[in-house]
Amino acid sequence: MIDELTILVGGIQGEGIISIGINLMKVLSSLGYYTYGQRTFSSRIKGGNTTMIIHVSLEKTMAIPDTIDMMLVLDEETLKDNYHRLDNNGLILYDNILSLKSTLPEKATAIPLPVSKISKEEGSALMKSTCSLGFICRMLDINQKHVSSILIKRFHKKGKKIINQNLQILERVFTYDKETIDQYIKHLNIPMKELNRPLMIGNDSIAFGALMAGCRFVSSYPITPASEIMEYLGKCLPSYGGLMLQVEDEIAAVNMTIGASFAGVRSITATSGPGLSLMLEGIGLAGMTETPLVVVNSQRVGPSTGLPTKHEQSDLFTLYYGGHGEFPLIILSPSTIEDCFHSTIRAFNLAEKFQCPVILLLDLTLSLSPQTIDEFSYEDIVLNRGKLVEESDLRQEAEGVKPYLLTEDGISPRILPGVLNGHHHITGLEHNEFGLPTDNPLNRRLMMEKRMQKLQPLLEEDEIVIRMNNKKNILFLTFGSPYGILERAVAVTGSTVDYGYIKMIKPLPKKQLIQIIKDYDLLVIVENNYSQQLATIIKAEIGNHNKIKSISKYDGTPFTVSEIIDGIEVLINEKYEGL
Amino acid sequence: MIDELTILVGGIQGEGIISIGINLMKVLSSLGYYTYGQRTFSSRIKGGNTTMIIHVSLEKTMAIPDTIDMMLVLDEETLKDNYHRLDNNGLILYDNILSLKSTLPEKATAIPLPVSKISKEEGSALMKSTCSLGFICRMLDINQKHVSSILIKRFHKKGKKIINQNLQILERVFTYDKETIDQYIKHLNIPMKELNRPLMIGNDSIAFGALMAGCRFVSSYPITPASEIMEYLGKCLPSYGGLMLQVEDEIAAVNMTIGASFAGVRSITATSGPGLSLMLEGIGLAGMTETPLVVVNSQRVGPSTGLPTKHEQSDLFTLYYGGHGEFPLIILSPSTIEDCFHSTIRAFNLAEKFQCPVILLLDLTLSLSPQTIDEFSYEDIVLNRGKLVEESDLRQEAEGVKPYLLTEDGISPRILPGVLNGHHHITGLEHNEFGLPTDNPLNRRLMMEKRMQKLQPLLEEDEIVIRMNNKKNILFLTFGSPYGILERAVAVTGSTVDYGYIKMIKPLPKKQLIQIIKDYDLLVIVENNYSQQLATIIKAEIGNHNKIKSISKYDGTPFTVSEIIDGIEVLINEKYEGL
Amino acid sequence: MKSMKDYSNSINPNWCPGCGHFSVLRAIQIASAKLTIPNEELTIVTGIGCSGRLSGYINAYGFHGIHGRSLPIAQGIKLANKKLTVIAAGGDGDGFAIGLSHTLHAIRRDINITYIVLNNQVYGLTKGHTSPLSGRGFITKSTPYGSTEPPIQPGILALANGATFLAQGFSAFQDQLVDIIVKAIKHTGFSMVNVFSPCVTYNKVNTYQWFRDSLTNLDDITDYKNDDYQSSLNKLVETNGLCTGIIYNKAPDIGSYTNSNLQKPLVELDLKFNKEEFSNIMESFK
Amino acid sequence: MKSMKDYSNSINPNWCPGCGHFSVLRAIQIASAKLTIPNEELTIVTGIGCSGRLSGYINAYGFHGIHGRSLPIAQGIKLANKKLTVIAAGGDGDGFAIGLSHTLHAIRRDINITYIVLNNQVYGLTKGHTSPLSGRGFITKSTPYGSTEPPIQPGILALANGATFLAQGFSAFQDQLVDIIVKAIKHTGFSMVNVFSPCVTYNKVNTYQWFRDSLTNLDDITDYKNDDYQSSLNKLVETNGLCTGIIYNKAPDIGSYTNSNLQKPLVELDLKFNKEEFSNIMESFK
Ligand SMILES: Cc1ncc(C[n+]2csc(CCOP(=O)(O)OP(=O)(O)O)c2C)c(N)n1
Ligand SMILES: Cc1ncc(C[n+]2csc(CCOP(=O)(O)OP(=O)(O)O)c2C)c(N)n1
Ligand code: SF4
Ligand code: SF4
Ligand SMILES: [Mg+2]
Ligand SMILES: [Mg+2]
């Protein structure tokens, strides 16, 4: 009996590889297991090899271990590319129409299975994915009825015939050659609670969070790995009276979002690197006009078109320092899917509270990796619209209202168009309290200080979540999806260090960081980019360069667990054994 | 007899105020004086007050002193706005049709002059500028013939009649009321050499430099304060067989420049903040494809449209850190007009040598302030096209050529389209040596390292010019136009500190900076922005935060000399008197 | 009753004396008065240019955005709150150089807003550069030897792209301009009004007099039919685009977002979902 | 003599089997062979999309740029070296969504390059999103309830904007496509070729069969005159844009940059000025 298992499915793009994986994760999630999935994308749309690796466990993990316990193989390439990761006790299930004989490894057990055969006999070749799913589940000793209930859900729109064919395939799978199969079954321990948990990708969680935050307008332009956000919202917003528009480009997207937000609707746009570069002027406009704006940027490999389907975290610099001129901006950096949801709600609240752009900074792995999650709690959803002026608060003022009233906290009361007696002007030119252009130097200074200082309260907040192993010498800190891998690496090494992630990068939680630099001998930043971007930002703002080190990777793939472990060990050795 | 003098001319926009100033500077420059001019812009096109302040001296200065010695006033507002700056022995010349009586100050001498009267009688009201010029020159005891020769040059295209009217006006001016005038004449010392020196604004110098560097193609979109560059080149390129295009937007501008540059023509585009934000994606493309690219960014007040005609230096962050992903980029930051010329030539050489984007970073004051300069030397113009492959070097290779050949210095031989057997592919996707897309992780790592490390030789260069007063305790360092003001401030305080400017900000001259941090107790960065951008960059890369301080200003106006003096004194006191 | 004064604020425009933009400003104010649009429902969005300053001179909600992006902002506002009367305005450079793509996509999208082009065939604010609407041979700082590119024909382009309301006005024909703007605002889809608004400082070719001499006034043509696509197009071709009046006016498209899809202004929707809705969505991920 | 093979490299396109883009690639290669364009003079510039990969499959100079910007890059290349044969190519999203403004300005500028639109009325590379050329009601990931916006008519828009050469092809009409591309390249101004290039994976509406059923082949109309603006426009309206062949072809404009203004390819000009030229300029600042 085991607590966790790593399973790979692979075949040719278009054969339903991803749906095998997703359905497997749904079955497991419905039984109370935690799952985490990682996809590889090939650069072609159809054809070409594709794989999905799934980790299943009793406790939540957000990383794929380096070794694979079981593989389901629908093409030869899958085996060739991944064989080196197979555990010594690994199991290979393969479609027996493949002639893998020659390449079959010795160290592992390989079981040929009649995947294509059963599928064709009971339905069509397209149903290989059901058949494959069935075999994997059988190997995990999962009850057939759990699998069929997921399939019924999945196919319920396709009609009885399709459902029955699929169920028939399952039936064949679950009765196939009991003797051979039973001998290799991998028995997972039963979860403590048999909760049926949801399965999401980060982009789902962002979209769901946006809905719950009251977002009712989206204008966006498709781009990997952000498109799912607009797709999800486009599908469900209309039923709630809202609207999603795919517009002509990212410049239109961000400006339309700004317009809708100015008019009082919580609105969002989502993009990735190239689109972000195009949005920078608009983001600056929101900063200057103090218009709330929420933008998702899910990072992929840059610069330029880079590697659109590969993982990186290299847009932090341009977000932290980018856009001509200087304006206030908040960067939230969720590290988990649960975090995505809550950060999104927080993003809308902060955008309205501080009247400025808020960036939700994701990465491809966090955006697209499916994962079993703990249900969010409705009670956690708290909405706050900031200093929004009610219609009844206003009387007609001879001199007009002041959208940029200078206040102690730098935040002016906000009036939405349509509100009686509230009409006013806003502009991306420097302006006075009335929102009218002026180049008076004193006014300029005051307005700059108003904008640049209004986020100061956030500097005091605790935005770094630290998992203490009470080894207060080294802290490994990261943001985004590497957190899951870091967590696992620390667990594997027997918790030799403290580790954590940062939830808000801008404004940088200075107070907490200064304390951290005091408390620890070494702060190690783990990030996926060349320039050690987060480490550089911390160095710029906090100093103590000699206490700040980096583990970074920039080859388009996420860290493996062992890369982090190696990194941890090297740094510990360097530090304490004078290497 | 005096060595220097500050003169202000002011009136209503459209009255030729700027041409009074420019012609005065030309007259003085032709006599061997150095001049430096500063314009104010009003936010309206026509009407509204405008002024120009001119400093004339025997030695070159690039700053306007805080007090004004002489004013020529064509409207009341000029006097009201600038009276506080008038020296106690100051002189006010004013058009006697103004009824300034009531507001006339007591401390200074005010001389009413028949400016409008003479102009109208001899020509038209439009000729007030000639008349004003004449009176100023007379007050400086400049020989009438020097003034007339400038006017003849200026009006030579307008025909005899106009020239004669203008000369007639001069005649009247120079014979007007000798008694009164002579009594107030400000006698300037005669320059050592009676050289006829040129007068330029920074943008002229950039354009001239581009021409001399072999730039033959410009595509640009108008924006203050960069437009003069395309205007100048648009005017003269056709006669040399070249071409300037005003295109539909900055995105087109930068991409067209990239195209022309890829095809082998030295090409340039020029913009300011808002346009720069739009160009970032294209700049990243040049970085990724390793295409030479020269972009001028002349900074104005941001963010967003900000204050388009006011001075700031707040685009450094977005240039240093901006654009999604990570790519090599060089930032040159000339501080003087001479520097503009040489930096431009260097920019083209570096862009081709390192095959990457090069930014010429200016600011509004440097771009637009006219100045007497020392003639550039033809012999200093050295052009170097880097690793450009000759047609004859190539044979037909079965596997094709490698535009991204991995070499020791990270720079690949460059082949221009049209070259026989040289055809190859380049792409903004990550690519292999052949320029074909691949997402292989090892290739990705090697290509990132190729690109990111190829600029390393520049880290070793001395890019900080230090004026030693051998007070090796504090170094005041700046970039762009504040340098002239800093220089003057130090001179005024009796050279109590060392000071300098940085010519290349990216890559940051680390070696030299580390030495500076060793040599000095304190490094003070003088810059016009809120976030202390240059200081922050130095802190991020060099550390030693406690040794780095800032003097910064962000109200849209350049530093005054006394602001810098105050800054110097405060910092000296803080440091050495334990304040 | 409302009067023009109700839509004026006390700011003195920074335009040159005689600039055509004054008249467009006035026409918008008069049209608003005629339609008695409540000030709090009028929202003016502008781009950057001399023209862009317009929003700062109207007693209404105003958003002065960035160069070329008035239409995306205006569409966002209208989609968020369809109760508002949204007018976007900007220069010829704003709408046909940097903003051309937005202009054409906005036409296509046919959202109920009005777009007024303050067309002076030059870049005023940057002190005289060529515009895509400048004529061949036009000499500016950036075309010292005359522009070599044929000008965009904004009217023809708009019709070719499916505009449902197209009109042209002239700063000196104040009454007609007011009338056009009234009808444009009433049109329930996207309405585009191209106004010849002379730049007295930087355009010495297309002057008031030049327009007086060149323009055909469609109101003077008794049998002109503005609901027939082909005759509208022909008229534009025939006059080389130099005509004023309502050139084309047809019922907007039923697909258009603000006309049919939205039950309620988005801004009036409840922000918070109830627990059941939340749970349903959560279930859907299982 | 050259053959198609001379323009092929060994790379296996990453397109789906059956994708229309294969045929466009082939047609460009055959046309190049027919014109015996030296490989070193052929320069292909592409945008981002499945279509954008095209430049990587041709044995020529190739520049695969960024999304929507193939035309600015291509124009820059041609202006720098007018000896090159420059072909820009990209998808319908590339050229009519994000790149629409560049497309129309390039048409207007009439520089001697050829622009080939690989038009599948959908975003292939992003795995199925709507395009501005998608039909009404088209269901995609981003229009789950069907697209509500009327599609842009690329041909009509191009003509309305003064295109001097406009043709349309269809991936399944290989010979016609080759012929069109040959003529487009020969045209000395800007030539636009809109190719219906079905996406077999994400467009289940505008399929090969659908086009076979819907297209009018102008080559079959014996009296079709492609040098008459009005008949070209009428034909496009009449066929709802669904026709193939050379729709319009007139002599390019004399003002066009590459035809008249440039004596010598810019790339062949001397880099360095002589001392006299330097001094003259220096003098001009006095
Ligand atoms: C992105 C960007 N590029 C350039 C500018 C500079 N700019 C300001 S207004 C303008 C054009 C003005 O012309 P037009 O739109 O015709 O308006 P007009 O001034 O003629 O009314 C330009 C290029 C800018 N503000 N932003
Ligand atoms: C600035 C930017 N935005 C978005 C994307 C994502 N993207 C890549 S290709 C594409 C559209 C592809 O459609 P199309 O141009 O029609 O080409 P096709 O794939 O259909 O051939 C998009 C939106 C991008 N690469 N860059
Ligand atoms: S420059 Fe032209 S457009 Fe601008 S305000 Fe003056 S007249 Fe009007
Ligand atoms: S997705 Fe469509 S356009 Fe892309 S390669 Fe496949 S068939 Fe062609
Ligand atoms: Mg204009
Ligand atoms: Mg397409």
Image (cartoon, coloured by chain):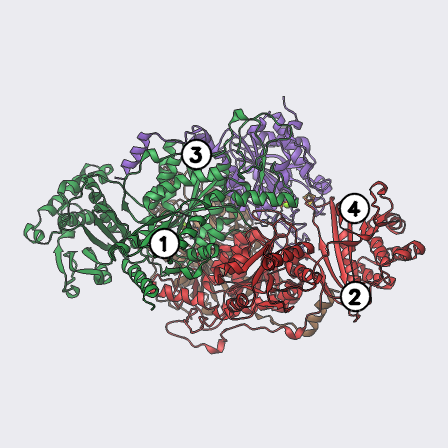
Chain colours: A red, B green, C brown, D purple
Farthest residue, direction front: A578
Q: Secondary structure at mark 3?
A: loop
Q: Secondary structure at mark 1?
A: strand
Q: Position of residue C64 (x, y in %)?
A: 44, 60
Q: Which label is found at residue B384?
A: 3
Read off the residue under disc 2: A30
Q: Secondary structure at mark 2?
A: helix
Any part of residue A248 in sight = no
Q: Pointer 2 indicates a residue of which chain?
A: A
Does residue A23 appear left or right of residue D222 in this picture?
right
Q: Quadrant of residue B180?
A: bottom left
Compared with residue D270, is residue A514 higher up or lower down, i.e. above or below?
A: below
Q: CA distance from mark 3 to mark 4?
A: 52 Å
Does residue C223 appear left or right of residue A90 in this picture?
left
Q: Position of residue A396 (x, y in %)?
A: 41, 75
Mark 2 Cα within 10 Å, few/some/many (few <14, many 20+)? many
Mark 3 Cα within 10 Å, few/some/many (few <14, many 20+)? some
Q: CA distance from mark 4 to mark 2?
A: 29 Å
Q: Which label is found at residue A79?
A: 4
Q: Quadrant of residue C144?
A: top left
Q: Are marks 3 and 4 on the same chain?
A: no
Mark 4 Cα within 10 Å, few/some/many (few <14, many 20+)? many
Q: CA distance from mark 2 to mark 3?
A: 67 Å
Read off the residue under disc 1: B477
Q: Position of residue D212 (x, y in %)?
A: 71, 39
Does residue A437 appear left or right of residue C184 in this picture?
left
Q: Pointer 1 indicates a residue of which chain?
A: B
- Amino acid under label 3? Asn
Mark 1 Cα within 10 Å, few/some/many (few <14, many 20+)? many
